[in-house]
Amino acid sequence: MTTAQTLDVQPTPLALLLLGREADPKSERGVECPGDLPAPSDPDLVARARAAKEKLGDRVFVLGHHYQRDEVIEFADVTGDSFKLARDAAARPDAEFIVFCGVHFMAESADILTGDDQQVILPDLAAGCSMADMATAEQVAECWDVLTEAGVADVTVPVSYMNSSADIKAFTGRHGGTICTSSNARRALEWAFAQGEGRTAELDTKVLFLPDQHLGRNTAVRDLGMSLEDCVVYNPHKPGGGLTVEELRAAKMILWRGHCSVHGRFSLDSVEDVRARIPGVNVLVHPECKHEVVAAADYVGSTEHIIQTLEAAPAGSKWAIGTELNLVRRLANRFASEGKEIVFLDKTVCFCSTMNRIDLPHLVWTLESLAEGKVVNRIQVDQETEHFAKLALERMLSLP
């Protein structure tokens, strides 16, 4: 008899979820792999992945997000950020299977943008996004009720970050809003505020920014010249979002209380420490970082911007990067021959834990299953959700 049996201890739902043995229908995380994964120690994994991919040929198109492990990136047909990859998938209508090595919301976006005859596959259904999980459809609907009761819903335009579930994208589409990425957030906010031009209403146009408060705040303050006082944070775990009617009516930016678990770790101490350790270092961070970190950095930009900045950097320059560790390590190796010193901004190792769930065993299992005629882990967005989510995405695509 085990200790657990002796004490009559049962695993909690959260414990089972973290072990990948249960599903949470309201979360991006969950579910056990339905097949037998190859052992990570299998020396033939690389050869097996190559063989299965070759057998599938043009029927499969493998997408690899920048934050993926090197062993997975090796088999990606294209790499990029979440939206670039979704668009790349849409540009390959002849590919029967889209294997998305990323996280759940990315695969949903790919399913929304690809044809009905294409099937999007996520190698591990437990690869979710903690940020996307911080805004559920029920919570956002309740928030809109709060805004309606405060008399500000009619002058509020939702802008949702790409890092959100299909349900949140659909909510955004239904309420006349748009999606944004970290690279076009400024244009999205400018578009949203322009929706109120010419109105004679008592209140100015507002933006409800979902689900990353830091990207919303940084874009509003750094790029649009707003003040921190123009921004309020809606907390879905507090009655009325923790805000008064007066605060909602005075605000320009209503920020959802969400954040990235990776970028949220970087602190002002991280910036000050790396400057002390590496004289002359350039600090380059992602706009999902906290405002004080962004304010203290030398350069700020999206994942693609980070890569492009390092590509253009002079030989011998020194860089501390505030983004996911897999990418930073890959960039450090890539530019070492040019004498560019690239380090992780924080001393503590920090991978994106859910993104890191996609490993070579899961990819091999996925490709071999498809090669054998078995479709596994298909991500499929229902038609109504897809319709409204696509409206919001198309508004983003039409931004100047």
Image: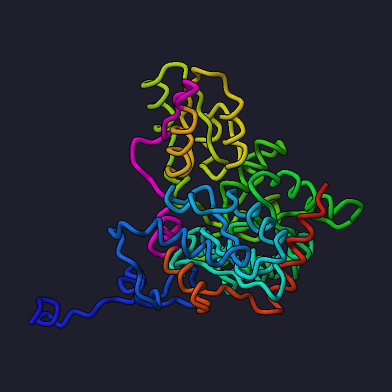
Q: Is residue 161 above or below residue 367?
A: above
Q: Residue 269, can we see it?
A: yes
Q: Is residue 225 above or below residue 113?
A: above
Indicate left or right for 279 with 305 as reference. Answer: left
Q: In front here: 353 or 38?
A: 38
Q: Is residue 337 magenta?
A: yes
Q: In front here: 150 or 125?
A: 125
**Spot occupied by residue 373 in the image (x, y as percentages of width and height):** 52, 78
Q: Residue 254, can we see it?
A: no
Q: Is residue 287 above or below residue 343?
A: below
Indicate left or right for 214 with 336 as reference. Answer: right
**Spot occupied by residue 306 in the image (x, y as percentages of width and height):** 57, 36
**At 49% from the left edge and 68% from the top edge, which residue is drawn?**
28
Magenta-highlighted residues: 336-363
**Spot occupied by residue 218 in the image (x, y as percentages of width and height):** 61, 41
Labels in figure, total: 0
**Spot occupied by residue 77 in the image (x, y as percentages of width and height):** 58, 53
Give the quadrant of residue 203: bottom right
Give the quadrant of residue 398: bottom right
Quadrant (top left/top right/bottom left/bottom right) for the N terminus: bottom left
Q: In front here: 340 or 214?
A: 340
**At 42% from the left edge and 42% from the top edge, which residue is drawn?**
325
Q: Is residue 361 magenta?
A: yes
Q: How is the image coloured?
A: rainbow
